[in-house]
Amino acid sequence: MIDFDPYSIEFANNPYPLYRQLRDEAPVFYHEGLDFYALSRYADVVAAHQDHDTFSSSSGPTIEKMEDQMLLITKDNPEHRFHKALVTKVFTRDRMNNMESFVRGLCVDLLEKAAANDEFDFVNDFAVELPLTVISELIGIPEEFRRDIHNFANITLLRGDVDPAKLMQAQAAAHDTYMELIRHRRAHPRDNDVITLMMNAELEDDQGVVRRLTDEEMAARFMELALAGHETVAKAIPNGATALQLFPDQRAKLLGDRALIPNAVEEILRYEPPSQLQGRITTRDVEVHGVMIPKGVKTMLLTGAATRDERRFENPDAFDVTRDNDVVAIYFGYGIHRCLGIHLARLEIRVGLEELLSRFPQYEVFPERGARKVLTNVRGFASLPCRAGAHA
Ligand code: HEM
């Protein structure tokens, strides 16, 4: 009998032994109490991403069923195609790469300011502030709203003892804020700004009509970019700093050869995927490894288990910055829902690590004094004490 409690702090602290058990003993696991299936092997997770007609996203990315289908992550084709194509037009690799000097300058400011203290919180003083500022600059969220957006994201992602009334209140407040921002931006368009470009972009929708996005649709884009655009990166950078401390030989390799950092970014995401599971719902009965998953049941694609699958990765529990990249990069999803922020995320994590290692090569983090929370599908530190050590 496998004891899988996705809402326990033990699972948030270390899901990996359980993932191994699932892969080995129940690759198609059914959770009776919460009525969901879970796929944990790499090949099965990839196949389910590819079969998006059977494994629909319409009930949301988490274990709980979600009704709201405004977000990209909850849309199926043909509607998804129109919305994704429109944002992809604007979120190009070149546009993201042009952010590099801004990202680097911000990293330097944040790290130098934080390091002026004997000890600082690596998560809140650096890892949250970096992507939150970058995405806010990119989509034009005024400074006075930024912390509210982070607090809203935190409430949305929390599980366990979250108060539903508080959640609804936060969602309503966020919606009002985004609608206000959209109305303001329509009245005051900006040159070459991502949201203005998105507002003005025209594309043929699934009904064959060439149109622009409505205010409600724009508010949904705004909301998902603000949320998805910072919470995952804010988890990835502390995961990286911690892994490099736990594996000092790997840290020494990066200090010796900075050209390895882009590959290390991929390894950090494989070793500790910030987005641990992707929610789907079946649109038909489907058989996997001899188990029939009935139509209309939530099925979780356990990304965190897939990236540690020994059927795909040699010695998967070892952190190895020279490991051959997983070309699929399953930690960014795969197929039609592949992460929109992939270029930006890679850029932020890479530059964050480059500046950390160049300035404070002897930094120390204290995961035993850090804290995690029980979250929906994201995993990482909520706080992580850090000492910068001597300046290089
Ligand atoms: C390390 C950082 C990140 C990780 C690990 C990550 C991971 C993911 C994953 C696994 C998905 C697929 C979800 C699914 O299949 O249901 C996804 C989708 C998405 N991500 Fe990211 N993400 C990261 C950063 C970002 C950033 C910086 C942005 C925004 C700029 C972003 C925006 C999105 C959006 C809008 C989607 C929905 C795409 C769709 O449904 O078509 N992500 N991400």
Image (tube, rainbow, N blue to C red):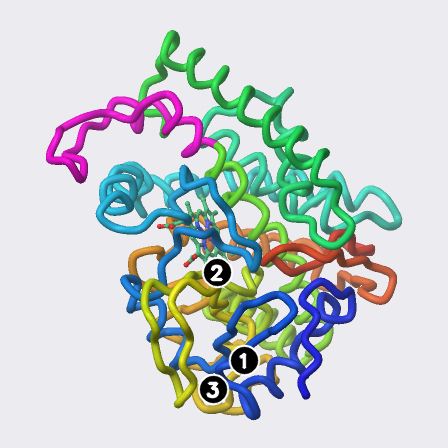
Q: Amino acid at mark 2?
A: Gly
Instruction: List the residue tagged with mark 2.
Output: 279
Residue 151's quadrant in the figure?
top right
First in sequence: mark 2 vs mark 3 = 2
Answer yes or no: is residue 258 visible: no
Q: What is the count of numbered marks?
A: 3
Q: Answer whether labels 3 and 1 touch (C-beta < 8 Å).
A: no
Residue 371 located left or right of residue 91: right
- Residue under pointer 1: 29
The mark found on residue 313 in the picture is 3
* Marks 2/3: CA–CA distance: 23 Å
Mark 1 crowdedness (10 Å alpha carbons): few <14, some 14-19, many ≥20:
many
**What residue is shown at x 58% (from left), y 77% (from top)?**
253
**Does the closest atom of ligand 1 sit within 8 Å of the Cβ of label 1?**
no
Q: As drawn, is 33 to the left or to the right of 95? A: right
* Residue toward you, 228 or 49: 49
Which residues are drawn in magenta?
A: 195-222
Mark 2 lies within 8 Å of ligand 1 (Cβ measured)? yes
Mark on residue 284? none
Q: Residue 27, can we see it?
A: yes
Q: Does dot 2 land on a helix, a strand or a loop?
A: strand
Query: Can you tell which quarter of the image residue 247 is in?
Result: bottom right
Q: CA distance from mark 3 to mark 1?
A: 22 Å
Dot 2 or dot 1: first in sequence order is 1
Q: Nearer the viewer, residue 295 or 65?
A: 295
